[in-house]
Amino acid sequence: MLERDTKFLEEAFKQYYFDHFDLIHVPDRPNQREFGYKKFNSGMNRHISLKNDNDLHFLLMTNIPSDVFCSNACYSFPNMAMAEKDWKEADLIFDIDAKDLNLSCRKEHTCIKCLSCGEASLVQDSCPNCNSTKLDLVSLSCQNCISGVKKEVLKLTSILTDDLHIPSDNITTSFSGNEGFHLYVKGSQYNQLGSKERGNLIDYIMFRNATPETFGFNKFKPSRSSFPEFNEPGWRGRVAKELFGSKSKRPKTISKIISDGYSTYRQKLVDIGKNSIGTKIDPNVTVDIHRIFRLEGSLNGKSGLVKLNCENIEKFNPYSEACLIEDNQVEIFGKCPIEFRLKNRKFGPYTNERISVPKYAAVYMICKGIANLA
Amino acid sequence: MISLGNDEITKYPFLAEAGQYLKDKGFTLEQFATDPDLQIIVDKAYERVECASWGKIFNSTPDGSKGGASLPLEVFSFLLAIVLLKLTDANTLISRFSLAEARRAEKFLEKDLIGNLNNTSEELAIKIFKDLFSVSIKKTGNYFVIPISDYLRHAVNFHELEWRLINRHVEKGMVFLNSHETVRLIRKELDAYIKSRIRAVQTPSLSQGFEEKVNKLVQMAKKFTVITTISTEYPPCIKHAIQALNDGENLSHSGRFMLATFLLGRGQTVDDVAPLFKNAPDYNEKVTRYQLNQISGETGSNTKYSCPSCEKIKSNDLCFATPDCDYIINPMQFGKKRS
């Protein structure tokens, strides 16, 4: 990133932090948490210990980070090296990202950025400017993606509250500041679980590794009565609804399943897990018990949008509600080959042209690497 | 500590404090080595170890009606088996013995959990689960209901799909199991617990009366020593990762981690492995060497990272399993053969 772009972003981020201390707090037991941050054009600084909100706000003002993180884990010595921290427990965390949903709209709001010459263009195999194949994919805001992610959030919330018996008051849902949502579960019976155990829990949530026997198909002696019923709790009930559609179709569908055979049913369970009923969380996040996770209220350095708590997910519009940078006009060179929307206003496409846009849009495009300060 | 009656100690002899138990009953180890009348117990102890070594469960059924008569033989044979194992000092026999004893105890635990015989047995079984293995059990109808977190802590020891939480009856934060599954869930920990109790026992000095049996056990242990050979061929996931890098593809972070940990685990050096990453689109020699040194434990926290499991590799879409991968759970096991 060019130095003056960095300076511009740092000024914008600093202003946001100064104006919104009320949104940025340390979590519970702050002195047991590890904090970390990234600066623009720089690597990660972690193993930091903070005592309270004042320490955090001081860090924001003095370092002006592009991204701020805090551990889901609690340690005896959070500022020591990983092996010496003395892990105590870790809150359960989930990340649902639009890029993992493979939605058909994705190609319409994604462009490429050449890592060699910086040119941004519509998706293709090589850079139209210098033919380099070292390319970055840049995805811009899309309401369809957000609707898709919201559906996954609701699926996940229902599994957490119904199956895992986590009180809904202990679950916090936040927009990630880019293309997804984070769910954070405080102080549950799952806090002491290690990575491997969380891996098993992830399979449950994502509906992976289900066997036909569990869902009623005994390989050697199939019996119609062992297939799931509509009113059963947990996954058997969900599978019944997905496979049979309605109670009246159950007998006919079971006949077909049995006649198609065991292997076909096993594949069917894999398919519905991947494509419909399974929750599309990022397993690498949930399995990680030493992760530092984006801090609520902080800005996302990939977009300039805020990681923001949302009380009512269905009504929440991240591209207006989480866009909290100021709106005074800024001159930039836009090289954005596709259009996007922020604060209900349409921007782009821009082909290497000098334009005047609100500061939040300038920050968004520069963070995405598809604009430079004029 | 769990308090035990005669019947319970016969079923779960590993709960007794070995030395104290002998003393309480008025015996010394020396007596077992020298007294011909006690030879039958030493023979039984040897039989118990031999039986376990061949993967069988020692056949004994404690019977409350026999009372004191059956008690010393059952418990003493267990304690003397430990003495023989300590004198033999063969890990393979200790492992086989503890597993067989765990499986023997499982049979009793299962019966006790169902609690048809009496409530005391049921309470003891539930207490063993809680005190030794931190599993809280509630009985609901024919089911044994345990919190999901307790279940997960123990289920990680199993690789079979039936133990994945998705294949379990789950309701409101609890897992529903039958008595057999409940007991099976703690087999590994039960085995580990018995093993730890054996290891904690001090090795006595070798009395002449035990010498012959110890020598026989040493010979037996040699039969179980397995020599393994590893083929030099790489597993398909590793071949695929190397191919992807050769083709200049952008191998994911987890793919690079898998490749590096595998090759370093097979004894290659950072100098051997670093050039493989040269074709990566974002190659930077300094960063590559830094990462490899961290993974190998040469720098950083000195932790040497191990190759991820097949399961983890599968979840990262890096698995390209062939029939040669059957029955392995980590790429490091690929091509390993017993000879």
Image (spheres, coloured by chain):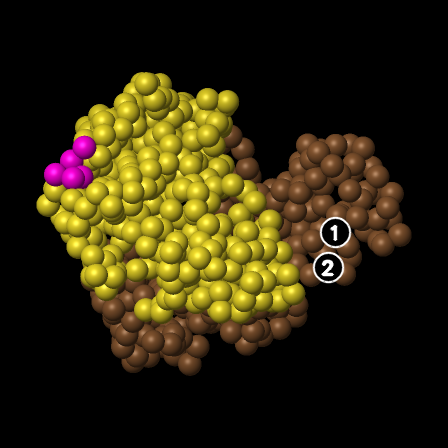
Chain colours: A brown, B yellow
From what the image shows, is residue A55 above or below residue A333?
A: below
Q: Both on one chain, marks 2 and 1?
A: yes
In what element is the residue under mark 1? loop
Chain of the residue where label 1 is placed in the rendered structure: A
In what element is the residue under mark 2? loop
Chain of the residue where label 2 is placed in the rendered structure: A
For the record, the magenta segment spans: B208-212
Horizontally, is A305 left or right of A88 in the view? right
Depth check, front residue: A8 or A35: A35
Depth check, front residue: A165 or B125: B125
At label 2, which amino acid type do we have? Glu
Depth check, front residue: B91 or B159: B91
Label placed on residue A232: 2
Q: Let me know if residue A147 is in the magenta part.
A: no
| Quadrant of the image containing the C terminus of chain A | bottom left
Q: Residue B165 placed where, x, y %?
A: 55, 52
Q: Which residue is mark 1?
A: A228
